[in-house]
């Protein structure tokens, strides 16, 4: 009886494992889509759900055809017509027709290649022709919107409120269009990829107030200009047509991926430091404790905006008794929350812990902000540029965005270690805690000491002359007789 049971269990196990093996083979052939959807673990957070869905315009297949977004479909057609007309530069109907047919055929060929980048279940409801038309109208809309916004705002014919909402929708993870489609349209419209158009748009979104330059920075900029001049006139050491690894162009899948790079620059974690962070010996230098802004201010740490807006540019510089924490400045407005959340969702889909720089920056900022007073300090120092909302709302924003986020444990590790080391320094804490009392005592007694020294000097310079009755003795000690 026992043998029969073992045979049954063995047969069931073999069939189950055979099915699992087939599934593994299928999963090995599948690749992660370049246009993923927001992970369910992130989307299920109630207070953030609205930040992942478009509010005015749909781009791509994931939100295409929704009733609340159909009004913008008519504007897409208008923008596409204007996009082609600006390319033709005349009213010749034949040339106009030839041009838009040429553009559509180019997009149609690209659409057949990029369709596999989307999740199949979401894009399969559209036929090939419908998918190609969607790519064409969405691509023309994006390019015409950017061109009018930056160079011809009078042709935009949209309210400022709608412009802000469209710009917000263009950076949603589930609202992306392949860069191959945009490159094909820009090639036919401008004669090249015209990366400068996208770079100008990114700068417009991340616009920061200019900071005052020190004399050292101005001198450094002049030297850099001279260096560039000599590099242009001197022959290059690289072989012609061969680019270095740092300047080699990188093909980005979509607009959000390219925008994500503007927060990082070329920063990367060195491979040598990629150790097991959960091991005890790898966490000896930092206990994991965080300190809010007000507590750090009490121990002499000052907050200053970094020279760049890269989220990797966080530094801590020590002085004799105090220190300065440099943090990349961030503008807080109506689109900040959805923008940060979609960048976090994009990083979550990458599956690489060393690329969680936006996530790590948000968690680091959330560790500094416990109360509205913390926001007030950062705002007064130019780290947070708040254009909308109160300090309480800003503190709540970081709390909601950082909810359930897990940062890269190696990100800003040295900064955290240096801050904790500064806070643990007993002598510095005592001096800074009693600095007001110490300064008062020093000032008080130094003033009294100064009065005494001044009095002694006066007595020494003007000594008292002896008097005998009514006769004054002169300074030469001569004797007078009455």
Image: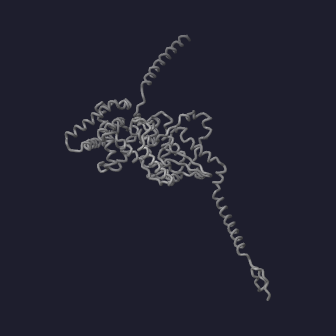
Considering every residue shown, the one lying at the far front of the view is 234
Q: Where in the figure is residue 223, as x and y percent of width and height?
A: 47, 49
Task: Determine which quarter of the picture holds residue 463.
Answer: bottom right
Q: How many marks?
A: 0
Question: From where the camera sits, is residue 43 visible?
Answer: no
Q: Residue at x 45, y 46 (%)?
A: 227
Q: Where in the figure is residue 96, as x and y percent of width and height?
A: 22, 40
Q: Is residue 59 left or right of residue 42?
A: left
Residue 224 versus residue 101 in the image, above or below: below
Task: Determine which quarter of the picture holds residue 102.
Answer: top left
Question: From where the camera sits, is residue 318 visible?
Answer: yes
User: For this rendering, which residue is in front, 346 or 144?
Assistant: 144
User: For this rendering, which residue is in front, 214 or 255?
Assistant: 214
User: For this rendering, which residue is in front, 79 or 374?
Assistant: 79
Q: Where in the figure is residue 195, as x and y percent of width and height?
A: 37, 41
Position of the N terminus, as image quadrant, is: top right
């Amino acid at each position: 009886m026992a043998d029969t049971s073992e045979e049954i269990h063995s047969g069931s196990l073999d069939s189950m494992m055979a099915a699992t093996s087939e599934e593994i083979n299928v999963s090995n052939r599948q690749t992660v889509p370049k246009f993923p959807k927001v992970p369910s673990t992130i989307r299920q957070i109630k207070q953030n759900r609205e930040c992942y869905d478009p509010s005015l315009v749909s781009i791509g297949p994931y939100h295409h055809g929704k009733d609340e977004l159909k009004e913008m479909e008519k504007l897409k057609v208008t923008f596409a017509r204007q996009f082609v007309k600006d390319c033709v530069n005349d009213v010749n109907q034949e040339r106009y027709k030839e041009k838009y047919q040429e553009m559509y055929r180019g997009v149609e060929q690209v659409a057949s290649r990029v369709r596999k980048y989307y999740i199949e279940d979401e894009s399969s409801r559209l036929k090939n022709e419908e998918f190609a038309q969607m790519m064409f109208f969405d691509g023309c809309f994006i390019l015409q919107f950017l061109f009018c916004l930056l160079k011809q705002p009078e042709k935009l014919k949209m309210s400022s409120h709608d412009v802000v909402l469209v710009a917000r929708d263009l950076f949603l993870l589930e609202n992306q269009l392949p860069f191959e489609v945009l490159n094909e349209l820009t090639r036919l419209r401008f004669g090249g990829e015209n990366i400068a158009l996208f770079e100008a748009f990114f700068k417009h979104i991340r616009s920061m107030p200019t900071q005052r330059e020190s004399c050292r920075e101005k001198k450094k900029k002049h030297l850099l200009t001279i260096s560039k001049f000599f590099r242009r006139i001197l022959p290059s050491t690289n072989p012609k047509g061969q680019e270095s690894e740092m300047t080699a162009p990188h093909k980005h899948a979509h607009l959000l991926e390219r925008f994500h790079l503007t927060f990082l620059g070329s920063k990367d974690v060195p491979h040598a430091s990629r150790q097991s962070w959960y091991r005890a010996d790898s966490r000896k230098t930092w206990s994991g404790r965080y300190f809010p802004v007000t507590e750090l201010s009490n121990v002499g740490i000052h907050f200053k905006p970094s020279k760049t807006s890269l989220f990797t540019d966080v530094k801590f510089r020590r002085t004799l008794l105090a220190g300065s924490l440099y943090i990349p400045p961030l503008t807080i407005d109506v689109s900040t929350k959805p923008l940060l959340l979609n960048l976090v969702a994009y990083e979550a889909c990458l599956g690489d812990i060393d690329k969680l720089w936006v996530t790590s920056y948000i968690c680091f900022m959330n560790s500094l902000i416990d109360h509205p007073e913390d926001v007030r300090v950062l705002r007064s120092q130019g780290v947070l540029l708040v254009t909308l909302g109160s300090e309480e709302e800003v503190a709540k924003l970081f709390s909601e965005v950082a909810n359930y986020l897990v940062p890269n444990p190696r990100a800003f590790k040295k900064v955290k270690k240096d801050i904790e080391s500064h806070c643990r320094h007993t002598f510095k804490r005592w001096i800074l805690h009693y600095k007001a009392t110490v300064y008062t005592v020093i000032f008080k007694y130094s003033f009294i000491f100064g009065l005494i020294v001044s009095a002694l000097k006066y007595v020494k310079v003007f000594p008292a002359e002896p008097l005998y009755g009514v006769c004054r003795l002169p300074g030469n000690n001569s004797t007078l007789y009455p």
